[in-house]
Image (tube, rainbow, N blue to C red):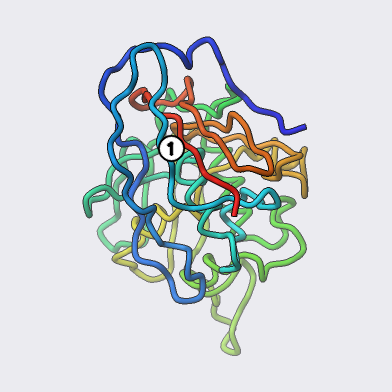
């Protein structure tokens, strides 16, 4: 049975009367993963009924066979639904809103003068929907999962990480004929539990925009390890830090409801994606 991390008593609270814009905008789609940057089609504002949740029907469909692991989308049919759900149930270090980079799980950041080091400061109040906190260690597990084929969460098939390869060219310990690293990414370094450094070999003007892509959402590494191939499936578990959690997922579609543990503003929407 699909497990949900949900505090149901808080979901019926009418603490706000206006809709909150919770879904971050995405940057331009990438050629090798056509669905990778496609932003959700706009939905019409819906007034929240007294004492209940406003229902908003989202444009993408979600297959009962989908896998909600945005890091390994391959551009296949159904990825639109996976990426749209990911924008709501997961969070990234930063977001793009109205063409501007804004905080996500990272409340602030600094860039070195040479453009090769990015220092991030995590929020102290962010947690997954099961209540476990987001820390530097969590981010390191995610980044090294994408970057390092030897990391236990990476899995045996590096070809799955198409978005990573498109932006960063390769993985750790891959070298060209001149013994130079193939990847433009150089690694992650811990400073403390809420602060870390990301290093790149070559300045990238769009580095923050890349990190705002849903493919670079931060997932719960402990659950990834425990669930293995079942993670993100309808019969497995999903655990994010985003503004919504999955209330139900069956052959007719998916229903998302506000996440009471989300670090940001509360919402009054119930989001519905149909099955294809």
Of helix, strand and loop, which one carries label 1?
Answer: strand
Q: Position of residue 46 (x, y in %)?
A: 30, 32
Residue placed under numbered mark 1 in the picture: 195
Q: Tell me: 269 left or right of 216.
A: left
Q: Residue at x 34, y 55 (%)?
A: 208
Residue 137 picture quarter: top right
Q: Tell me: 189 left or right of 16.
A: right
Q: Residue at x 70, y 54 (%)?
A: 151
> Against 33, is 257 above or below?
above
Q: Position of residue 269 (x, y in %)?
A: 40, 28
Q: Tell me: 145 left or right of 57.
A: right
Judging depth in this view, the residue of 68 and 166 nearest the camera is: 68
Q: Residue at x 59, y 29 (%)?
A: 247
Counting other residues with Cα less than 10 Å from the Cα at mark 1, is it few (<14), some (14-19), or many (20 or more)? Answer: many
Quarter in which the N terminus is drawn: top right
> Against 259, is 136 above or below?
below
């Amino acid at each position: 049975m699909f497990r949900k991390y949900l505090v149901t008593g808080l979901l019926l609270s009418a603490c706000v009367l206006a809709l909150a814009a919770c879904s971050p905008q995405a940057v331009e789609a990438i050629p090798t993963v056509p669905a990778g940057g496609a932003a959700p089609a706009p939905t019409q504002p819906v007034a929240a009924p007294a004492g209940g949740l406003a229902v908003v029907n989202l444009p993408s469909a979600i297959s009962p066979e989908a896998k909600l692991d945005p890091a390994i989308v391959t551009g296949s049919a159904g990825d639109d639904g996976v990426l749209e759900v990911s924008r709501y149930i997961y969070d990234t270090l930063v977001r793009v809103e109205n063409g501007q980079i804004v905080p996500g799980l990272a409340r602030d950041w600094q860039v070195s003068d040479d453009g090769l080091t990015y220092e991030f400061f995590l929020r102290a109040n962010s947690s997954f929907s099961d209540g476990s906190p987001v820390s530097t260690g969590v981010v390191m597990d995610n980044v090294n999962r994408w970057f390092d084929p030897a990391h236990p969460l990476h899995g045996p098939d590096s070809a799955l990480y198409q978005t990573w390869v498109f932006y960063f060219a390769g993985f750790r310990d891959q070298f060209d004929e001149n013994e130079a690293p193939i990847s433009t990414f150089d690694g992650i370094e811990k400073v403390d539990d809420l602060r870390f450094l990301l290093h790149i070999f070559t300045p990238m003007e769009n580095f923050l925009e890349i990190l705002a892509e849903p493919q670079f959402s931060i997932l719960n590494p402990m659950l990834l390890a425990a669930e293995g191939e079942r993670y993100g499936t309808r019969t497995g578990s999903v655990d994010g830090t985003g503004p919504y959690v999955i209330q139900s997922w069956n052959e007719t579609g998916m229903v998302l409801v506000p996440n009471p543990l989300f670090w940001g503003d509360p919402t009054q929407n119930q989001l519905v994606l149909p099955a294809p």
